[in-house]
Amino acid sequence: MPDLTIPPAPPTPPTPPVPLAALLAREDLGLRQIAGPTDPDIVIHWAHTSEMPDPYPYLLGGELLLTAGVHIPEAAGSGTYFADYVSRIVEAGGVALGFGVAPVHDTVPRALVAACDHYDLPLLEVPPPTPFSRVARAVWQLMAQARLAELRRVTEAQQSLAAAASRPDPVPSVLRQLAQRVSGRAVLYGPDGTEIAAAGRNATGAEALAELARVVRPTETPASATPPTSATDTVPGAHLAAYALGTGQGFVLGVAAPHRAPGDHTIASVAAVLLSLLTGEHQSRTGAGRSSALVRLLLGAPPENVAPLLGGDRWTVVHAAPELDGAPDPVAASALGAALGSALIDLTPEVVRVLVPADREPAPQAGWTLGVSAPVAPQDWSAADTQAARALARARATRAPLVRHGSSGRPGLAELVPHGEAEAHARTLLAPLAASPALTETLRTWLSLHGSWDRTAVALAVHRNTVRQRIARCAALLDADLDDPDVRMELWFGLRHL
């Protein structure tokens, strides 16, 4: 049966075990195996010293038990002492026994050698110059080396999987890398259980792996139950694992490997995350809709025709800048989009732009300064983008967490003038500034901030003297007294309709 529960903490440390053969190969220790099997697959998890006649209560399993034989009675060779002693070590899970020669015993007792052969327990002779502490230290040194090698293997695997995900054929590339790293086979199963893609050699247990994938697939689980995110199983010649991909669409990653190294679960988990992103983006309805909308826009379709693919008729544009200096982080930008309720995110070096359905009211977000446009139809997305940029500039200047375009909410006098006539008047009034967008934007920001030099400088990210020079230039080109409130009101009216 597959293992679906979280297992208890294992009795062995979270470091790779050490082959007994590697310890015997250490010339500085001078260890010699004199009894028991010489299987190269025998591994030890730690070294422990004990002179108890019954070490069973003090062993956890996986030990190399070291003893100098202090506990051995004089008449031990004529009875069952050594047989009982060795059987208890084996029963406790001990992997090997190291017997120190001198000062108590000149040689390893022959009855102990016979008992170890009988119970298939490797017996090592520890020479007099080698203290037990040196043997224990050598075990931990070998463990540290194995741990470092395993970490390096996992790191290299993560890098190769990430590189594979960026290739033109990302899904097959990720599966190939995963199969190579675990020396087995990697399979991507679809929502209906069919094999979509696979890589690696044909391992035993293919049917068992497909059955294991059903266990973690959401569509195979009753609505009242929560399916596990992963499951493992073992069949002759293969270790099996299945991972439910995070898209919620029923995709499953299956892995079959002849051996299960400590880092294999981490490597497979990284592959599962990458495949979740790949299948979620290209197979989910929202991802397909976004792709279709983008293609149609690139092919010349008007925004109002592609908006239904994105799921809304009216939209709000949000410009967001991190409160701390520096370029926006891609991960933080994705989190911001999720908080605002939209996956339509554009990350630029200065700001993050998010297209949000109008029924999702943007709220202040910790660590961000937001400028929000008015709700618009798709054909007015460009105008809303400009509104959001201006709102963000005002938010930064006033140190407000969020500013909405036209946030007063009250009908203004501008509504009494027909839109076409207002635009014509604005173009005529501001014609002297038409050749200099920087002057126009500076005048707009300066007026919106009630003539504050410092706040305008902050909003435009320029020096306050630059603001003074630009406003003076505007006054000269417009031949207007910008200290006159009537002049300011008329210019503001024109700028809002420009």
Image (cartoon, rainbow, N blue to C red):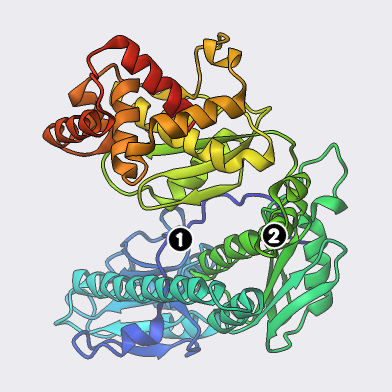
- Which of 47/127 is in front? 47
- Which of 73/21 is in front? 21
Q: Is residue 347 above or below residue 141?
A: above
Instruction: Between label 2 and label 1, give the one nearer the viewer.
Output: 2
The residue at the point 68 percent across, 27 percent down is 359
The residue at the point 52 percent across, 73 percent down is 161
Q: Is residue 168 visible?
A: yes
- Which of 70/91 is in front? 91
Cα distance, mark 2 to mark 1? Answer: 49 Å
The residue at which mark 1 appears reads as: 12
**Of the residues shown, which amino acid type is indicated by label 1?**
Thr
Residue 230: % across, % down:
68, 57
Give the quarter of the image for residue 234: bottom right
Circle 2 packing at 10 Å, graded few (<14), some (14-19), many (20+), is: some
**Of the residues shown, which amino acid type is indicated by label 2?**
Ser
Residue 307: % across, % down:
73, 45
Residue 416: % across, % down:
59, 12
The residue at which mark 2 appears reads as: 291
Q: Secondary structure at mark 1?
A: loop
